[in-house]
Amino acid sequence: MKQVGIDAIRNVAFLGHGGAGKTSLAEALLFAAGNIERLGRVDDGSTLSDFDEDEKKRKISINTSVLPVVTPSGKINILDTPGFLDFSGDVYGALRVVDSAILVSRASVAPEVGFEIGWDRIKSRALPGIIFVNKMDRENADFSARVKEYRALCGSGMVPVIIPIGQESSFSGVINILTMKSYTKEGVSDVSEDIDPDIATYREWITEAAAEGSDELMEKYLDTGELSTEEVEQGLAASITAGKVYPIACGSSTTGVGMQAFIDLIFELLPSPNVNPVAEGINPVTQAAESRKALESEPLSAFVFKTTSDPFVGKITYFKVMSGTMKSDSHVLNANSGKDERVGSVFYVRGKVQANTPSVGPGDIAALAKLQFTHTSDTLSDKAKPIIYPPTEFPADCYHLAVKATTKADEDRLSSAIQKIAEEDPTFGHHRDPITGQTIISGLGDTHLDVIVARMKRKFGTAVESEEIRIPYKETITGKARAQGRHKKQTGGRGQFGDCWLRIEPLPRGEGFMFVDEIFGGSIPKNYIPSVEKGVRTAMDRGVLAGYPVVDCKVTVDDGSVHAVDSSDAAFQQAGVIGFNNVVNLANPVLLEPVMKVEVTIPKANMGEVMSDFNGKRGRVLGMESMEGGKQKVTAMVPQSEMLKYAVDLRAITRGMGVFTATVDHYDEVPNMVASKIIEVYKKEREKAQAE
C-alpha cells in the first residue's frame, strides 16, 4: 500500500443508522478505486469490513474497521463504525482520530434515529462532514424529499452538491453541481443547468453557503450576488471545514453508481489531517502543557484509538500518528505507563488484511502487533520528548448480566478471558459482587453482552452461562431487644456448652457493626468472649430474614454461664450464632435495598414518559435541568432492583436518543409488600436445598 503525504490523506468516519449501508458504501468505494477485484456483500459475509465471525452471523457491524481507499489523488482512511447502539464505544474511538465524517442515510425513508444520533455526534465535536444519501436505486427513493427533511432537522447548512440522475429503477448516474459534470456508466461529461429544474435552486444555496467561508466572499456576494466557480469551491471548502455547511451527495453502494463522483468530492471538500495541525497534550513528567505539530520533523507521538485481542495473532494496536514518524524495528515510549515498547512490524490494515510498511508519517492511521503495555487511549511517543494526549471519553456501561462458568475448566479460564475482553473494549465492565458472590459483566446493551459471551467461547475457549442478577440486599434492625443464646449438646463423653445473653440496638445507616463486652463477675470467661463475637459475625453474614448480611447494629454481651468441662470456643461460637438469630428476630428486622442515583439526558419530548416510567419503578425525581440542543437532564433516586433492564427501557422510550448513568448512592428500607416476596422466595429456596 503506497504512502502519501499528509495533504493527500482524508481520515473519515462512516456514521449512520444500522442498515443505512455504511459497510456496503465502503466496499463500493474500494471497488470503484480498484483496490479490490470483487464487490463483497454484507448478506454473504464477504465484505472486507465485517470480517469478525459475530458480524458475519448477525449481518451487522460490531467493530470499527479501518479501510484505506487508495486513489491517484491520495488515500481515504475510512473508519467504518457500527450503527447499532450497543456497539457505539467503537464509534467514540473512531471519532477521536478522524478529521471529518460521512453520515450515511437511506434514500427511501425519512432520517432514522441513527441519523439523528450521528448528527449530534458530528455537531458536538464540530467535525466537518458530508451527508450521503444511499440506495438511490431502491423503491421509494426520493432525493428531494430527503433534502427537505435534512434541512428541516439540521438547518439550512445542508446543501446538495451531488444530485441523482433519475431515481429508483431509473437511477443511472449523478451530477456534481459544483463542476457541472455528470457521472454515469458511460463516463464523465459536462452537463447544462437545465438538465434538472432543482439545480438552479441548489446552486443558489451552495453560493450562499460558500459566501460564509470568509468576510471577503460574503462582502462580494452581497455586493454583486455572484461568485466565481473558484470562489465557490474555495468558500465552500472553508465553510465545510468550519462546520457551517454540510454538503449532500448521493449514490448506490450496491450498483456502484456515483462512487467515483463521491471519491472526488471527498478529496475536493473534506479537510486533510493538517486542518488542525497542532495537537495538545501534557508532559507526563512535569505535567506541563505540551503540543505537537503534524510534521515529520517533530518528535514521534501517536494516539491509540482501538485495541483488539486475538488468541492466534495476539494484541493488535490501532493508532494515528499525530507527529513525527512511526518506524518498524524501533523502540517507543508508552507515555501513560512509562514503559518501553518494542515495535516490530508497522502495518497498514484493510479490514483483516495487513500490509507491512517501513514507516507511517503524520496524519496517517496504521497498526502494531504484540505491544505489551499499551491499551486504548494511550499515547506512544519519543522517549526524549514524551507527551500524553487526552483519552477518549467512552460511554459508561449501563446494562448488567450475571455469568458463571459452565465447567471447572471454564472457571479457571474465566478471569483471563474477561481481562482480555476488557483490554479491547473500553465499554465493557466487570466485577464480583461481594454480597451475592456473582460475577457481573456490563456493557451498553443486551446484544453487546450476548456478543461478548459468544466471544468468550469462540476466541478464548471459555463457556459461560447467564443467570439472574441477585440484588445485594442487606438486613438491619429498627428496634432494641435482649435474648439468650444457649448451646447445649450431650452425645456421650465430653459435651458442648455455651451460654450468652445479647442486647442489640440499631446504629445510624452506614455505621456498620459494633460489638461490646459488658461481662462483669466472670459469668463468661474472657477467653470465650472472642468466640461469642465470632459466632455473632458468622450469623450476621448469613442473615436472618432472607440470607443477606446484617448491618448497622450494636451487639452487647452482658451475661451468660459456663460449664467447667463442656464449655469450649466452638460451643460459645454456636451460642453466639443462636443468640444473634434470637435477638434480631425480636428487634424488628427489615430488608435494605441499594438505591441508585440516576442521571438521564433525554429529548424534551420524552420528559413525560421518562417521569412516568420512574414513578412505576418506585423512583423519586430529585430535579430537572435544561441542556443544550433541546435536551433535558433528569436526576432521580431509583431502587437497583428496578434498574436492571433500564438500558433497554430507556432506548425504547427515547428511540435510542437517551443516555444515563447510575451509581449506588445509599441503602434504604424495602417496602413491606416487596420485602415479603423476597423473604418468601428465600424460604422456599432454603427448604428446597435442605430437602435435597
Image: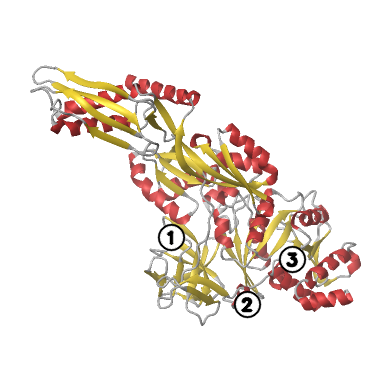
Mark 3, secondary structure of its residue: loop
Mark carried by residue 245: 3
Mark positioned earlier in the residue sequence (1 or 3): 3
Q: Residue at x 18, y 27 (%)?
A: 572
10 Å neighbourhood of mark 3: few (<14), some, or many (≥20)?
A: many
Q: Is residue 640 left or right of residue 244?
A: left
Pick whichever of labels 2 and 1 is earlier in the sequence: 2
Q: Residues within 10 Å of mark 1 (few under 14, many from 20)?
A: many
What's the CA distance linking mark 3 and mark 2?
21 Å
Badge 1 element: strand
Query: Residue flagged by tag 2: what amino acid is it?
Result: Asp
Q: Is residue 430 above or below residue 273?
A: above
Q: Amino acid at mark 1?
A: Lys
Q: Is residue 400 visible?
A: yes
Q: How is the image coloured?
A: secondary structure
Mark 3 or mark 2, which has the lower sequence index? 2
Cβ–Cβ under 8 Å for marks 2 and 1: no
Q: Nearer the viewer, mark 3 or mark 2?
A: 3
